[in-house]
Image (cartoon, helix red, strand yellow):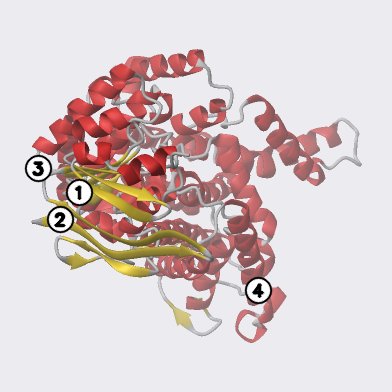
Amino acid sequence: MRKLWTSLDPRLRGFVVLALCAFIPLLDGNPSHLNVLADAATFILLALGLNIVVGFAGLLDLGYAAFFAIGSYAYAMLASPQFGVHIPFWVMLFVASGIAGIFGILLGAPTLRLRGDYLAIVTLGFGEIVPQTFLNLSQWTNGPNGIGPLDQPVLFNYRFGLHTLPYYFVGLALVALAIVVVHNLQDSRLGRSWMAIREDELAAAHMGINTTKAKLSAFALGASFSGLAGVAYGAKLNLVSPDQFQFNVSIFVLSMLVLGGMGNIYGVIAGSFLLSALERFILPQATIFAHDLGFSQVDFSNYRFLMYGLILVSIMLFRPAGLFPSRQRAAELTAGKTDEMVAAHEQSLYTEAIK
Amino acid sequence: MSILVLRGLTQRFGGLVAVKEVDFEIEEGTIVAMIGPNGAGKSTVFNVITGIYRPTAGTVEFNGKAIQGRKTSDIAALGIARTFQNIRLFAFMSSLDNVMTGRHSRMRATLADALLHTPAAAKEERLVKERASEILRFCGLERDAHTFATNLPYGAQRRLEIARALAGDPKLLLLDEPAAGMNPIEKEELVGLIRRIRETGVTIFLIEHDMSLVMQISERIAVLDYGEKIAEGAPEAIRTNERVIEAYLGKPA
């Protein structure tokens, strides 16, 4: 059974898992659980997008929530009574990911010469500027009140309304789309050039890789994923406001990569799922449980940043490459202490794997 | 015909003149070496040729076209490939991926191809993989195709750099100290490899400190000292050239 499973194309394996996920609502119709899962799908999209920028191209982006905001606001402005423009949800998925992609290029362009810490600082700045801008452009965005209600998606005369179920399926479909795209990118000329840039930018240029174009395409594609996520999230919530896109969202998504395993698609998905579940399900449930036991003062949700901190520190200590690391990351992080044995062990694992 | 012509090439870094009015021509299909004491400006010449630096003065002509100051990636696409003095492989990519990356400038797949995994792109990918495996075999690395570059033994890393450079079907191959740190057996293999590369029609321009290797394979040698070309000629002539001996050993007291 295991052999059959590993012999399948990884794309196919992803689809089998997603197809199984499509049956979850039959087993558990609790709308609040489905709500958690639908939001988890949004964060998986975000994490897969950020993974292109950080995991593949090695460009540390601490302001990724900016593109999430841009995607959401694009939907809010072009599909709501705000300006009387009502572009359908399905069209907006493409439009918003395009807009977010363009902003990915605009915000990426000034950072092209920066690497590592310096890049992180500048992107952090952008991550602060964008929500601030939406906050202050109050004549268009209603400032802190946000924009709402937003148009509900309609599929063949079926109005989504405020049910969670259809959003869950939309989320699932978008994740499936994202997995296919990321897989395609990974084994492509472009994907290789991102990894080459991550490893050695100067050498990459000597291979004929136009590093400017390659980096901008990483920023653009990464941002376009969060455009998709922004539309899906905004439509489900029916409201978009600046406080949904604070710095902690960028860090939350980055933590998902670190937890799951940067560079590895399924690691990233697992990481986002686990952190989403912790934030939206496990901590609230634990609080209810504590209340039932009579500790009525306890609210575990207040400790979530403490939890993230603990998780990240433990990951760094015990599994620095993440729960499900990519082969590269695992090797990189053991390289410091690499002796013949580690190398030989990895080699044997890999030759096993390719058999 | 000359494949590469340097005319009056000068590179200044602030007050330091790293390369001073160097004139040099390389015939197509030959193996040519550039030697000189440490800090003589040899690697700087390479860096100017591949577009890392824009020369302060002078021209670099490749196949009759001036290329000085153009983007490194464009120059690579024209058919100049190189290796580095300090190995600069893509450490955490497999040997095969390193070589496939080396073929970047000969590939056509666009962003849309990558996103949609088009049949044309899939076919190209397959052909490139085959070609890359061929090149690995040519360089004696076929057994290491799936090993991370960083896990290869030193000599193999040097050969992988050459393999990666060859992947782009270059017309001119620049080798920056290809034998550095190699043991005698590895050097022997390297000489064989360089000769076989030349037989495929690639012109080779190398920087090297190992004199026996240089004398063994070069048809012409240029000598650089303090950024100036002090001699040029066949190996025999260079071996006995007084200025060269002086540059390496100092003036007799």
Residue at screen point 15% across, 55% down: B3
Q: Nearer the viewer, mark 2 or mark 3?
A: 2
Q: Earlier in the sequence, mark 2 or mark 3?
A: 2
x, y percentage for residue B160?
30, 32
Q: Marks 3/4: CA distance?
A: 67 Å
Judge left or right: residue B138 versus residue B245: left
Q: Chain of mark 4?
A: A
Q: Residues within 10 Å of mark 1 (few under 14, many from 20)?
A: many
- The residue identified by callout 1 is B172
**In the rendered structure, which amino acid carries the disc numbered 4?**
Gly
Q: Nearer the viewer, mark 3 or mark 4?
A: 3
x, y percentage for residue A115?
55, 54
* Residues at circles 1 and 2 in contact by the CB criterion of under 8 Å: yes
Where disc 4 sits, the SS reads loop
Where disc 3 sits, the SS reads loop
Where disc 1 sits, the SS reads strand
- Is residue A181 among what the camera can see? no
**In the rendered structure, which amino acid carries the disc numbered 2?**
Ile
